[in-house]
Amino acid sequence: MKYSELTEKELNSILKEEQKKYEKFVKAKLNLDMSRGKPCPEQLDICKDMLSILADKDLSKLYEIDPRNYGGLDGLKAMREIFADLLDVKTEQVLAGGSSSLNIMYDVVQFAMQFGILGEKPWNKVNGVTFICCVPGYDRHFAICKSLGIKMIAVPLKEDGPDMDIVESLVKANDNIKGIWCVPKYSNPTGCVYSNEVVKRLAKMEAASDFRIFWDNAYCVHYLTDNHDKILNILEECKKAGNPNRVYEFCSTSKISFAGAGVACIATSVENLADIKSHMTYQTIGANKLVQAMHVEYFKDAKGILKTMEKHAAFLKPKFDMVIEKLNTYFEDSDIITWTNPNGGYFISVNVLNGCAKDVVALTASAGVKLTNAGATYPNGLDDNDSNIRFAPSYPSIEDLSLACDVFATCVKIVCIKKLLNK
């Protein structure tokens, strides 16, 4: 229904009914946490056999280096080959690290801040070093910038990627803009997929020589359906455009095997990789190669990972489908809420009436359902419209998720109707 077309009496009648429902939810004393996109226990069990897979292996002979010992700053070659296959790059462009791609991202930004990139001035010597942040986006990206004193400019994320007219204009006019955060496939939280045009424009646009695209390809194989979206190879496009060092690409198995014990990687130009390793060599002798060996022996190759992702989709798709079905049931043709229907990834992005997101999240929390903080998908937690809410369906059971959707819908109606009534 179009709530804006209802009379004051009709709105108050609906509000009264929804408030009755809300009181019942409060009395039920729910305790559901949907604040982050975590794999559910059943997903974590998919790869449990990996934990014992090395028990009978002669690790001294399997790899170019004994994974139990020191060394191997690049990671095991076999692990790098798997990532190279997934990302369609050369093995020599890949470094396999620890469990967290976020850790690698932070290190790379920190290295640039402290030492500069490929002989350029360190970013902390640049007056007003700035990153472009696609919004709504990933809060952890923005937190890295905030922690290191990097200014952030929010640029709207469209259905096919960032608004490139704005991006191109900004980076051309300001050499102090040194980076852009991108989640190019099944973006967090909207689920958008970058178009060929957007990828090509990012690769060839005029920018500072030490400008870098931080290409967080976290969901490159996280499909929900058999219709697999494809994106252009950003490293290849940058090379074609004469900017071979422009991009750092990141990926991990954190939502493929174990969220707390996966393997992460960075893929970039050989020149960039040598620069990064020149700093890493003082930081570490090498990542946990036993965990890398576990992954190699279990998955064997990129095809093994894709087969595992089909098992993940079997758990995730029914949850996403149920949330979309619930939202359609409660809000079909509504004018107080919109949402995305992604083909992959871990999130659904919801927009409610301007000025209502914080109140919806707070009211939902008071009923025992914790969502991601409103504003988290924007730099410094500041959503000027106060409208975006990140919905993470992955962790709860279907039963709990269904109940969470009921609570959420009731809270959206209460807050938005009050907004329309100016209460």
Image: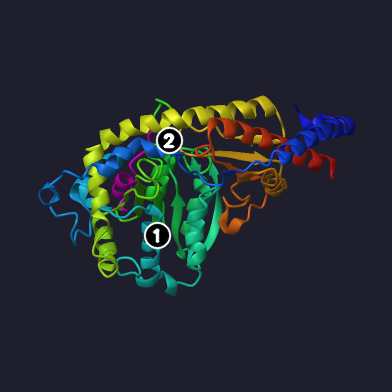
Report the side of 53 relative to 143 (left or right).
left
Density class for disc 1 (Cα within 10 Å; few <14, some 14-19, many ≥20) is many
Quick one: quadrant of the C terminus? top right
Alpha carbon separation for disc pair 1 and 2 = 41 Å
Q: Position of residue 174 (x, y in %)?
A: 48, 63
Q: Position of residue 390 (x, y in %)?
A: 58, 43
Q: Can you tell which quarter of the image residue 112 is in?
A: bottom left
Q: Can you tell which quarter of the image residue 227 is in?
A: top left
Q: Which residue is mark 2?
A: 42
Q: Earlier in the sequence, mark 1 or mark 2?
A: 2
User: Is any part of residue 332 visible from this angle?
Assistant: no
Density class for disc 2 (Cα within 10 Å; few <14, some 14-19, many ≥20) is few
Is 391 located above or below residue 109 in the figure? above
| Residue 394 painted magenta | no
Tell me what residue is drawn at x 60 percent, y 31 percent.
402
| Residue 233 painted magenta | yes
Report the side of 274 relative to 147 (left or right).
left
Q: Nearer the viewer, residue 231 or 101?
A: 101
Q: Which residue is mark 1?
A: 211
- The three-letter code of the residue at mark 1 reads Phe
- Magenta highlight range: 229-243
Q: Nearer the viewer, residue 191 or 318?
A: 318
Report the side of 72 relative to 319 (left or right).
left
